[in-house]
Image (spheres, rainbow, N blue to C red):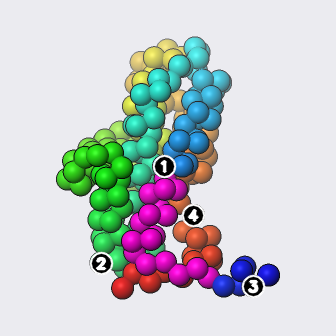
Amino acid sequence: MLKGLIKRKLDADRLANVFVNSILEISDNGFEDLKEMIKYDPAFVSNPEVENSCADKFLLIITVGNLNQLHHHFEVVEAEELRRLIIEKFARIFEISSREFEDLLEQTSSYISQVNHPSKNLLYGMSKAVFHKFNLNEHQEDYFRTLKTPNPLFLKRMDEVMSNFLWDWDQFFKKHKISLN
């Protein structure tokens, strides 16, 4: 009974561990569901077969989306320190340097901004990035395929799906006390 009343205290390193492990878990567990949702989406005239190689692209998209949210929930210095720790942990997992992982994130972030221009809506950008990175345009009806833009009905459904891959900080703060200093 008391367990629900006591908040678990996390420092920056532990929070970074929880963040990285959670992103990896939702990416691994959610990718197959995402593939199925895309395959049977009514916006497509043919069923797209999303390659398993897209799992890495998906992980980068949701990692960028979640890292971009840090500044909304932490002071600038805290967000930057947390981001640095998260990048270090991901780099160790993938056996690359922090700089290399940072470069992958920057490329993905730039791509999201590019396909989402002029909108600044992060969720919309993540959905559009999935559409383009997964090469879904060829499966659309002629009108949208010619425009090289996702069917808005597909994007709306994808926004709903992608929102499930964004960290729920409000819920997290209810359960944990954060001490980043």
Which-is-in-front pick, marks 2 and 3?
3
Task: Tell me residue 120's x, y (percent).
Answer: 39, 54
Mark 3 vs mark 4: give the one in front: 3
Residue sitting at x 58%, y 14%: 46
What kind of secondary structure does the magenta stretch mostly adopt?
helix
Identify the mark nearer the N-term, 4 or 2. 2
Mark before the other along the chain sequence, 1 or 2 = 1
Quick check: 116 above or below 70? above
Q: Residues within 10 Å of mark 4 (few under 14, many from 20)?
A: few
Looking at numbered disc 1 in the image, what kind of residue is underneath it? Leu
In the image, which disc is placed on residue 24? 1
Q: Nearer the viewer, mark 1 or mark 2?
A: 1
Which segment did they paint magenta? 7-23
Label 1, label 2: how many angstroms apart (C-alpha)? 25 Å
Instruction: Choose between 131 and 103: the one closer to the eye.
Output: 103
Badge 2 or badge 3: first in the primary sequence? 3
Q: Amino acid at mark 2?
A: Val
Q: Could you tell me which secondary element the residue under label 4 belongs to?
A: loop
Quadrant (top left, top right, bottom left, bottom right) of the C terminus:
bottom left
Residue to which mark 3 is pinned: 2
Asked which quadrant contains residue 152, the reply is top right
Please give the residue where the numbered disc 2 appears in the rendered image: 77
Q: How many other residues sit within 10 Å of disc 2, few (<14), some (14-19) or many (≥20)?
A: few
